[in-house]
Amino acid sequence: MATLLDRADVLIAGGSFAGLAAARALGRAALIVDRAPLGSGQTSACGAPVSLVERMGAASSILQRHDYLRIAVGDVSVAWSLPEPFCTFDYAAYCRLVYQRAGATFLQASVQGMENGWIHTSAGAIRTDLVVDATGPRSVLAGGAHRGRRVAFGLETELPASPADGLAFYFLPEVRDGYAWAFPCGGTTRFGVLIYLGRTKLLPALRRFLQRFGLTPGPIHGGYLAPGLQPAVTGKVFVGGDAAGQCLPLTG
């Protein structure tokens, strides 16, 4: 972690998947700035190819491996073998491991904007020549060129559940304009619902989905997804992750 610096070789705004991937490539030259502590504020169901998690140096964050994908439409379910093993992983552990491997510096502060090579944050201004905007759909630094895109919204809870295998997606009447999912994670399962149209009042839909399993929601978390590729460079800002719409539109 870091105290305030007045100068950074590369400033990365956002400390989740895209920001950490950039830091992994840039190493000690990178300063990551995020308003939340590193590894907190999970918004993802955290399912990814095993090879990707291993390549990022976070293999020990893997909770369960999966060899197939299950699609359920109503009461009909079909399973497909995945072209390579996927996994569900612990978000906080993943972030911590990637950060440690990167050797970057982290500063907890809100990024507010940029002007003439200075990045304004809640902890003060930082001078930098290179900037990566990985702030998600807010795209704080990319500016107006990245506003107005279509966004989806998802809500998820993680509960103790009977052992299962496979990443399951459900297309159901109770989740209109979107889908639900169940991702086993060892002794728990992540259950969630997503609406493509960005509506955020999804708790009733999540409750109805969980009724199929005889469950009720526990602690919940959620967030926006922004599919639709945007320019990867805006002015002097490199843009990555959800800030650049680098999100698969069907599955998020």
Image (tube, rainbow, N blue to C red):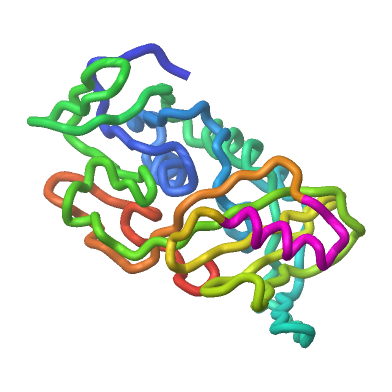
Query: Which of the 4 image quadrants contains residue 81?
Result: bottom right
Q: Position of residue 164 (x, y in %)?
A: 86, 64
Describe residue 239's horizontal placement relative to residue 213 as left or right. left
For residue 50, say whether it is visible.
Answer: no
Name the one closer to the observer, 81 or 29: 81
The mark total stands at 0
Q: Residue furthest left?
A: 116
Q: Is residue 215 magenta?
A: yes
State which quadrant residue 163 falls in. bottom right
- The answer to whether residue 72 is above or below residue 219 is below
The extreme top residue here reads 3
Q: Main secondary structure of the magenta part?
A: helix
Residue 206 part of the magenta segment: yes
43 left or right of 185 in image? left
Residue 239 image position (x, y, % from top left): 28, 51
Q: Residue furthest right?
A: 162
Tell me if residue 100 comes above or below residue 211 in the rendering.
above
Which residue lies at the image location 21% right of the left edge and 33% below the top edge? Answer: 113
In terms of depth relative to the viewer, which is nearer, 155 or 205?
205
Query: What's the residue at 45%, 58% (across, down)?
Result: 225
Residue 143 percent across, percent down from the top left: 19, 47
Image location (x, y in percent) of residue 94: 62, 42
Q: What's drawn in magenta, residue-wise?
A: 202-216
Q: Is residue 8 left or right of residue 77?
A: left
- For the residue pair 227 and 93, the one nearer the viewer reads as 227
Which quadrant would residue 67 be assigned to in this image? bottom right
